[in-house]
Image (cartoon, rainbow, N blue to C red):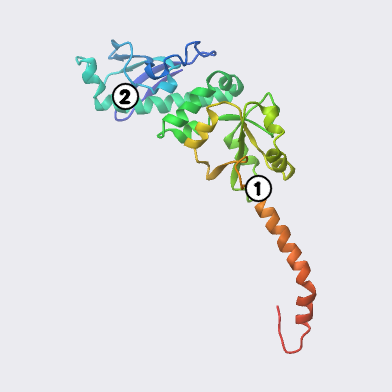
Amino acid sequence: YCTVIEGEVTFKAILYVGRSAPTDLFQNYNKKTDSIKLYVRRVFISESVDDLVPKYLSFVRGVVDSDDLPLNVSRETLQQNKLLKVIKKKLVRKILDMIKKMSEQDFELFNKEYATNVKLGVIEDSTNRVRLAKLLRFGSSAVPSDKTTGLEEYVQRMKDKQELIYFIAGNERGELERSPFVERLLANGYEVLYLTDPIDEYCMQSLPEFDGKRFQNVAKEGLNIDKSKQAEQRLKELEQSYEPLVNWMKEWPSTTVQ
């Protein structure tokens, strides 16, 4: 993937993501260094620049070349350069755009290899959390067990007046499907997301809502799943119960009742 970014600072980038994740992707995660080489005016500057991309994107390989950075500068001074900080910000956004296109082409393959990285990004990168949330994929009661769904698709399938995105967390899908909480939701026509990765719940804690819809763990005590449906049913029962009284009052000579 090649790109040219212009603006406050201009730079070129060649970026690459392997079809398979590196075997050591999460070894010494907190000590990970970037796999992107930095050039200034085609002169090699550094094998890796600290935090040129965040750690959750350490699987991205590439080269960045800019004519706007100073050529004769120490690596330590370069770290504090304002233009480099702009490059970092724009580079991360460009990488996320690239990943979005990749996931659209074969999201199941991408999800299999890099789902944990995306979830770590949601947890660690508040600046790009909304962008990353669009890349999340989970098992769902609305798709086969060998498929996943995105949050955008979930929201599109939501029932009228549904305000919550329902999910349940556990070790494996079969176990979650047998939950009485899930069975109750499904019986009322709601979709439930199945969170089976240990990191999923931490991810949800960092993402309180998506597209204006809050997340709701259906296994939490006191959840009134079909509150609106029950309210409608109760209203109908009351109308039927008081119908004779209303009709009688309408016929009362001295009273006008609408």
Q: Is residue 74 above or below residue 158?
A: above
Give the image location of residue 74, x and y in percent.
20, 15
Observer-nearest of 131 and 202: 202
Residue 235 falls left or right of residue 209 = right
Give the spatial CA distance, label 2 vs label 1.
52 Å
* Number of the label disc, if any, that sits on residue 107: none
Q: Quadrant of residue 190?
A: top right
Kind of residue indicated by mark 1: Ile
SS at circle 2: loop
Locate the C terminus and report the quarter of the image it occupies: bottom right
SS at circle 1: loop
Q: Which residue is mark 1?
A: 225
Give the image location of residue 29, x and y in percent.
42, 18
Q: Is residue 69 visible?
A: no
Q: Is residue 172 above or below residue 161?
A: above
Residue 118 falls left or right of residue 194 = left
Residue at horizontal 54 percent and vertical 30 percent from the top? 200
Q: Is residue 27 visible?
A: yes
Kind of residue indicated by mark 2: Thr
- What crowding class fits label 2: few (fewer than 14 Cα within 10 Å), some (14-19), or many (20 or more)? some
- What crowding class fits label 1: few (fewer than 14 Cα within 10 Å), some (14-19), or many (20 or more)? some
Give the image location of residue 225, x and y in percent.
65, 47
Give the image location of residue 143, x and y in percent.
69, 31
Residue 81 falls left or right of residue 3 = left
Residue at horizontal 47 percent and vertical 33 percent from the top? 131
Observer-nearest of 110 and 28: 28
Q: How many marks?
A: 2
Q: Nearer the viewer, mark 2 or mark 1?
A: 1
Residue 175 falls left or right of residue 95 = right
Q: Is residue 213 above or below residue 24?
A: below
Dots 2, 1 in contact, CB < 8 A: no
Q: Which residue is mark 2?
A: 10
